[in-house]
Image (tube, grey):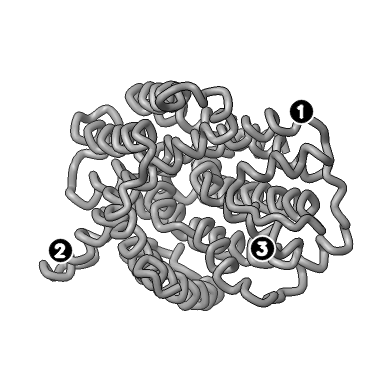
Amino acid sequence: MLKKLKDIGPGAMVAAAFIGPGTVTTATIAGSSYGYTLLWAIVFSVIATVILQEMSARLGVIGSLGIGTAVRRKITHKAGRFLASALILGAILIGNAAYEAGNISGAVLGFNEQAKDWAFNPLILIIGLIAFLLLYKGQYKLIEKFLLGLVALMGMIFMASCIASGPDLGQVLRGLLIPSLPEGSLLMVVGLIGTTVVPYNLFLHASGVQQRWSGAADLQKSRWDTIFSVILGGIISMSIMISAAVAFEGVDKEVKSAADLAGGLTALMGSWSELFLAFGFLAAGLSSAITAPLAAAFATSEILGWEKDMKALKFRIVWLLVLLAGIIFSCLGFKPTAVILFAQVANGLLLPVVALFLLWVMNDKEIMGKHINSKWANLMGIIIILTTVVLGLKGVFSAFGFF
């Protein structure tokens, strides 16, 4: 088992990416509003993420291709390639720059009270500096180990909070195994799935595995890494939801953010819970603050045919622009609403498109050889694609205020 744990790496980056402030907040609100009843949505999210990320990782390990590179190779029609490239660059490069502010702001969420007399929380600059130094160093293994440490920290904090809260295990099992949709919960289910199955992780994973593995001999290591890491990420999400369900059971209070979770848990676990969870939010925000710029740089380099070298000037310029956008918007205390609106629409369209494209590539024998998708994998992929279409439409409609 210890030997297998040494193979954890690129998958942990995926987990670190999707356990960000958005996931923490969504899981908190879901738990406080609907108790344990929506745990099954996280189970579905984990299964869908494992299937798609395994395909993405297999593309990197066997085909030695990132998704952006595969787009340029498979789509030969100029207009089609241009449209696909524009959508990917818009959703991931511009989108991640917009969301980076949320990542950094979410990281300092638990420490805002200590900085209330400041124009902005100085911890924002420290987080930005940590992300900058790690990315500028340009050593993939260093970033991988750092993010693995953050995932482990989040796991300990949120799972410890869950256990300490003393949940009803019978209700937990019922929520995990029996899908139900309480009145008004449909959009929350879509939100839980949408914060776990995210398009930029597919780009990050396909590129990340190439930094570590190559060839069929490494395929089992990659699969183990993907399955273990994504399931761990799902358990962390479940722990947050369960903690919120216990903390706010019977409490007549509307929970609007993850910051409310600490207050709710204080009554159950004492004053230490607030600081404990503050470090959990810090790890969640910092992990996403690192992976978002990195994914944007990988995707942009692949789409534009640049050298995919983490120390290359163009690669560094991309992640630096994304990181700076996040730091500046966080310090100014406002969200770039118009850009986020665009990002929501672009990501809503991108998720099913990338999933469909990935399914297409994974059935190409010239690229994948004997490691093409099985019939089972294709069937599951189609089901997930149909689900992502619903997610995409919801994202587009909600961006324009229809939901």
* Dot placed on the residue nearer the N-terminal end, 2 or 3: 3
Residue 117 in the image, given as x and y percentages of width and height: 49, 22
Question: Residue 351: where, in percent of width, then height?
Answer: 39, 65
Vertical side of 167 occupied by 163: above or below: above
Farthest residue to the left: give it.
78
When the figure is inspected, residue 360 is found, relative to residue 242, above or below; the finding is below
Q: Which residue is mark 3?
A: 43
Q: Amino acid at mark 2?
A: Phe
Q: Position of residue 276 (x, y in %)?
A: 70, 30
Pick whichever, 90 or 342, lies toward us. 342
Q: Nearer the viewer, mark 3 or mark 1?
A: 1
- Percent coordinates x, y for residue 363 in the rendering: 39, 71
The residue type indicated by label 1 comes to Trp
Vertical side of 2 occupied by 395: above or below: below
Residue 149 is drawn in which quadrant?
A: top right
What secondary structure is marked by label 1?
helix
Query: Which of 221/147 is in front?
Result: 147
Is residue 363 something that shows in the picture?
no
Q: Which residue is mark 1?
A: 272
* Disc 3 from disc 1: Cα separation: 30 Å
Give the label on residue 82, or none: 2
